[in-house]
């Protein structure tokens, strides 16, 4: 399959990267988020993306960025996905979730919240001052509405032990943990140590013994996996990521073009 010219025949799940804008500047961001792109789809176009994905068979969606809630129309876009009956989730650093999420959070399948450490100092050093408190409050906000939370923890080889504190927060709040190994694309730096994967697996197994079934896999297959042709693999499985300008990630196709052949 020539991935660049590949046209999906089915979509089982939609990852909607609605903006590249973000309120944070994480060094390891794999898509170098920061500023909004000049050609991002507008509200109506994103609703059309949802319609097309559903016509191609999509049953679930994940809304991400950048930071998804930086876009003022994100509640409208997310709400439309809920109206269409898709199992709808968001990945957020917590930005204004408690302020603008009250109208849609109850309907969400899950909220993934980025939190890389149980220590505010460690987390803020990587993501920005005050970001730990924002993320931690977002976890409590979603759990107060009985919405499932997955703590999305980005882990590097020298910070595997951070998982212990993260698992503790998850256990205390009734949440799960999604471990994201540090990526080597975008602004991310090369992981230190050849034994990172083995050390990570060992730590996860130890914490599973202590806390139970607390770790989850990436249901959306959104973040590229180290050492694999990620987009090639997941597109064939029906997992489609749409970039802010409407391009299907890993191809040169625009998803709005599929409307012509749907």
Image: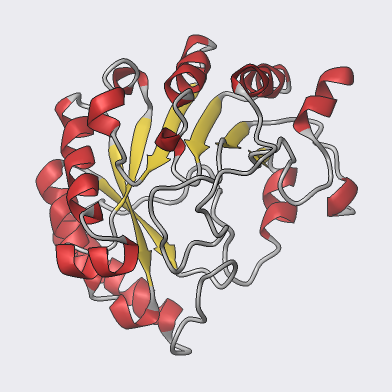
Would residue 212 appear left or right of 14 to someone viewing this image?
A: left
Q: Position of residue 219 (x, y in %)?
A: 48, 43
Image height of 128 relative to 47, above or below: below
Q: Residue at x 41, y 63 (%)?
A: 26
Would residue 158 appear left or right of 90 to someone viewing this image?
A: left
Q: Nearer the viewer, residue 251 or 10?
A: 251
- Which quadrant of the structure image shows residue 124? bottom left
Q: Residue at x 65, y 35 (%)?
A: 40
Q: Residue at x 86, y 44 (%)?
A: 6
Residue 262, can we see it?
no
Q: Nearer the viewer, residue 242 or 148?
A: 242
Image height of 185 relative to 89, above or below: below
- Which quadrant of the structure image shows residue 89? top left
Q: Position of residue 205 (x, y in %)?
A: 29, 68
Q: Position of residue 181 (x, y in %)?
A: 44, 67
- Which quadrant of the structure image shows residue 167? bottom left
Q: How is the image coloured?
A: secondary structure
Residue 84, can we see it?
yes
């Amino acid at each position: 399959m020539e991935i660049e010219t590949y046209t999906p025949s089915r979509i089982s799940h939609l990852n909607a990267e609605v903006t590249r804008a973000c309120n944070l500047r994480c060094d390891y961001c794999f898509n170098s988020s920061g500023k909004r792109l000049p050609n991002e789809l507008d509200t109506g176009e994103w609703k059309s993306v949802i319609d097309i994905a559903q016509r191609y068979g999509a049953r679930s969606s994940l809304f991400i960025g950048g930071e998804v809630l930086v876009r003022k129309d994100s509640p409208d876009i997310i709400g439309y996905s809920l109206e269409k009956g898709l199992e709808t989730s968001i990945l957020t650093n917590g930005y204004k979730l408690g302020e603008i999420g009250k109208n849609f959070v109850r309907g969400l399948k899950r909220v993934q919240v980025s939190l890389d450490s149980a220590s505010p100092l460690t987390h803020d050093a990587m993501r920005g001052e005050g970001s730990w408190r924002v993320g931690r409050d977002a976890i409590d906000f979603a759990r107060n509405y009985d919405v499932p939370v997955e703590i999305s923890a980005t882990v590097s080889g020298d910070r595997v032990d951070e998982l212990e504190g993260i698992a503790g927060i998850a256990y205390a709040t009734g949440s799960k943990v999604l471990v994201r190994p540090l990526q080597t694309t975008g602004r991310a730096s090369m992981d230190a140590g050849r034994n990172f994967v083995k050390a990570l697996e060992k730590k996860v197994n130890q914490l599973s013994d202590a806390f139970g079934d607390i770790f989850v896999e990436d249901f959306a297959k959104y973040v590229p996996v180290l050492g694999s042709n990620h987009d090639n693999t997941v597109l064939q499985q029906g997992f489609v990521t749409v970039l802010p300008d409407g391009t299907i990630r890993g191809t040169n196709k625009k998803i709005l073009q599929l409307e012509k052949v749907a």
